[in-house]
Amino acid sequence: MLKNIKKGMLPFLIAFSALSVSGSAAFYSVFGLSKLFAGASTEVIIMAGSLEIAKLVTASLLYQYWETINKVLRTYLAIATVILVIITSMGIYGFLSAAYQETFNQLTYVENEKKFLQQKTDFYQQDVTRYEKELQQILDNITSLSEARSVSIQVKDTSVAGGVRNTISTVDLRAAQTRLGIEEDKRKDVNLKRDIAIDSLRKYQRKILELDNNVEVAGELGPLKYLSGLTGYPMDKIINILLLVIIFVFDPLAVSLVVAANFAFNQAFPKKRENLYGEKVKTEPSFIYSEEDEKRMDIIGQNGNDGEHYSDDDYNKDGIIDNKDLIGISKERDNYPVGSDEYNRLTQEIIRLKKVYNLGK
């Protein structure tokens, strides 16, 4: 029993791999086709699912009965299988491209949002720069007016020594003070506007930083963006090449594994004849020995195997019927599928030669 388990381990492993690959291919294909025909998604899922099952069954049927099936039907089934592989590949392409497009749309939205926020940032940056220049001009005016208030003039005054004294013009002083008050009010107003512009600038800069740190979108399309920058090709072209590589490998591999599983099971568990009720029966030679054959057997008993009386049984035509003839027939039998009519006929011939000529010992 352990020997049978070891013998069947690889075929079952191949079968499991074939089912997993073909199952995932069918899933992606069915839902991909439903996205292509979104108006009737349920109907498409039912139709595509049945076609996927039929494709695998057809591939197994062609392998098992290639020699015996009608040529016209065999040709049609082979063409249908290839077309179904193409349809499955189209469905996989639709599924994966839709998934990429969804993420790409998010990236496009983020990039457009960043452009809008960058425009706002540039606008408020210009306001801040303008207000700072205006504020600096006001501060310069205030400094000049403050200096003007301290400028003295000389007037004649006989009550002081020299007849001249220094004083400040009241007219100029009043004008400077009035102007200074106006500049001070302007400074406060411009300073308030600048603070508002700075707050708005920081708000939009913070939003841009949040978009740049969007881990979800950056993680999904990060490798594609890297490849795009490395190769110089747009992301759309890179994703199309990647999808084509996937679909050319995915479903053809699934069908190939199904055929390989059939082959492995045939090699590990050779076919046996069964009766109508399923019981295994031992294959017996179907030859009916005629009276002439009985006479030949009598001659063998009298003269031995030497001579040319039995050239029909002398497979290699060397004048002697021996184990070499059995080897030749066995090699010819290996050219036919196990369980085929020709394979069974040659097996019966080997049994007959062993029995008649006492060979194989």
Image: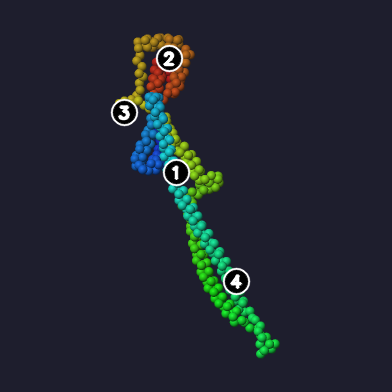
Circle 1 residue:
97
Q: How crowded is mark 2: few (under 14 residues within 10 Å), some or many (20 or more)?
A: some
Q: Distance between the residues labelled 3 and 2?
A: 35 Å
Circle 2 residue:
313
Q: Do the residues labelled 4 and 1 touch (CB within 8 Å)?
A: no
- Going by the numbered disc 3, the residue's amino acid type is Gly
Q: Are marks 3 and 1 in contact (CB under 8 Å)?
A: no
Circle 4 residue:
140
- Please give left or right for residue 154 compared with residue 128 in the image: right
Circle 3 residue:
278
Query: In the picture shown, does residue 247 fall above or below 263?
Result: below
Q: How far apart are marks 3 and 1 (CA)?
A: 50 Å
- Going by the numbered disc 2, the residue's amino acid type is Asp
Q: How far apart are marks 4 and 1 (CA)?
A: 63 Å
Please state which of residues 58 and 300 is positioned toward the viewer in this rendering.
58
Q: How far apart are marks 4 and 2 (CA)?
A: 126 Å
Please state which of residues 206 and 115 is positioned toward the viewer in this rendering.
115
Q: How crowded is mark 3: few (under 14 residues within 10 Å), some or many (20 or more)?
A: few
Query: In the picture shown, does residue 165 fall above or below 47?
Result: below
Q: Which of marks 3 and 4 is in front?
A: 4
Q: Quadrant of residue 156?
A: bottom right
For mark 1, give the secondary structure: helix
